[in-house]
Image (cartoon, grey):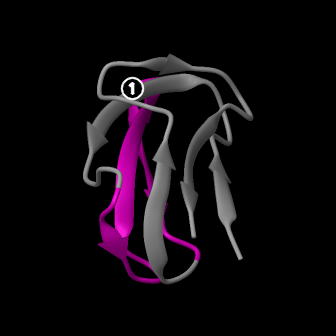
Amino acid sequence: MAEDIHCETAGTIWKLWVKEGDTVTDGQELFIMEVMKMEVPYEAPCDGVVKRLSIAEGDVVKEDDLAMVIG
């Protein structure tokens, strides 16, 4: 079952630690957003493979934008 990872708020993708095809584990840090000068880490909610990546470092995203799909 695929798990969609959405941005919880607007901000900038500061660091991206994974790419499409990477295997990830539950709790693994996937990326860091910069939100109002604060770093907000996003972690994998489950084990799986990054099936789709919709963000890149430096991207400005809005709340609820799709960041990636883990399947």
Number of labels in the image equals 1
Between residue 29 and residue 52, name the one nearer to us: 52
Q: Residues within 10 Å of mark 1 (few under 14, many from 20)?
A: few
Residue 38: percent from the left, percent from the top? Answer: 41, 35
Asked if residue 65 is positioned above or below residue 28 in the image, the reply reads: above
Asked if residue 54 is positioned above or below residue 48 in the image, the reply reads: above
Residue 41 drawn in magenta: yes
Residue 40: percent from the left, percent from the top? Answer: 45, 46
Identify which amino acid the numbered label 1 is placed on: Lys
Between residue 37 and residue 7, name the one nearer to us: 7
Asked if residue 27 is positioned above or below residue 6 in the image, the reply reads: below
Q: Which residues are magenta?
A: 21-45
Principal secondary structure, stretch drawn in magenta: strand
Snapshot quadrant of residue 63:
top right
Residue with the mark numbered 1: 37
| Residue occupying image coordinates x 49% and y 70% | 44
Tell me the SS state at disc 1: loop
Residue 51: percent from the left, percent from the top? Answer: 49, 57
Snapshot quadrant of residue 25:
bottom left
| Residue occupying image coordinates x 57% and y 70% | 71
